Amino acid sequence: MASERQVGGPCQSWPKDSAFIREVLDRIGDKWTVLITSTLSIGRMRYSDLHASIPGISQRMLTQTLKHLERDGLITRTAYPEVPPRVEYELTDLGLSLMDAVMAMAGWAAAHHSEVASNRAASELSGVGRRKSSESASAR
Amino acid sequence: MASERQVGGPCQSWPKDSAFIREVLDRIGDKWTVLITSTLSIGRMRYSDLHASIPGISQRMLTQTLKHLERDGLITRTAYPEVPPRVEYELTDLGLSLMDAVMAMAGWAAAHHSEVASNRAASELSGVGRRKSSESASAR
DNA sequence: CGGGATCCTTCTTGATACTG
DNA sequence: CAGTATCAAGAAGGATCCCG
């Protein structure tokens, strides 16, 4: 595989403007962002519902990620001035469009993950990307 | 915006199989992976060329990221047994296909970064996602 | 030239406790 | 309920030195 490709062909066209690409990648590269937005893609939810729907997230990370998403206009935050406070979050159209892009990535993942997995397994046996026990447990 | 969307519509369809999506996201969420693969999309390169082409990367990260990419079958590593050692890296078809997906993300970024930027600026003024000086310098 | 092995510093994150 | 504030632990990243 990858026997003969013509070099210089596809996409050598971002010299220095990789700034916003990095911004987007920093956002979706964040574990919680994807989980939160995908959960919100079901519909608007309140804080506690999100917390319950996403196992393992701390309030700190939930709050922080929600703020980042709100700041970038990917979600809206609506606080109702009631006696027991109620706050609801919802994806904006912008956030929804990002989800589409993420789903595209998910499509690639679904299409190629087995290939990646077998490559990885083969490398593991031959000792290419071998990790040193301390790494083998969990990657972050 | 995002005034009335029908809930439950788009993409509520990954309950627990988000495992490989995370794998892919962990990979492209990594700052150096994208820079390296996009550089390699120009054509095969040797270690020192990559190091020179990517400003600010350390040998440690370059080597490590290259190993991860090789392990997953996204690039190939070819070592020539010469007197001054020569090692060349090249994207595989798999790696190239991932680049396509990344370029799709770049497309989203290009289309919406101004919108995100203005949202962010507006939030900055109203104090929504305000950071506390220690965060404002660099986000990782 | 192309890394491998260490050390050391910084940033991120989870846990916990407190508040409007 | 919906956060905020503080703290400690761990991982990621850079710098440096060395080897084949």
Image (cartoon, coloured by chain):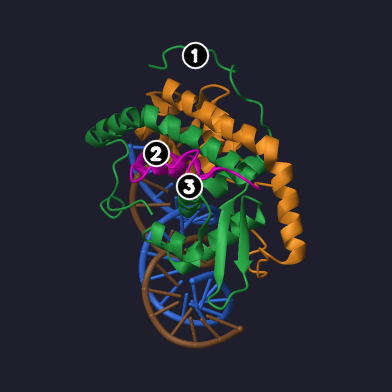
Chain colours: A green, B orange, C brown, D blue
Q: Which residues are magenta?
A: B3-31
Q: Of the residues shown, which amino acid type is indicated by label 1? A: Arg
Subunit that carries the residue with mark 2:
B
Residue for badge 1 = A5
Q: Please tell me how crowded label 3 is: few (under 14), some (14-19), or many (20+) other residues with Cα within 10 Å.
A: some
Q: Secondary structure at mark 3?
A: loop
For label 3, the residue is: A42
Q: Mark 1: which secondary structure? A: loop
User: Residue A99 at what x, y percent from top left?
Assistant: 54, 41
Indicate the position of residue B26 as horizontal and vertical percent values.
44, 45
Q: Which secondary structure is most common in the magenta stretch?
A: loop
Residue closest to the eye, A102 or B72:
A102
The residues tagged by marks 3 and 1 sit, at their Cα atoms, a distance apart of 42 Å
In the displayed structure, B7 sits above or below C1; it is: below
Does the rendering let one see residue B39?
A: yes
Which residue is denoted by mark 2 in the rendering? B68
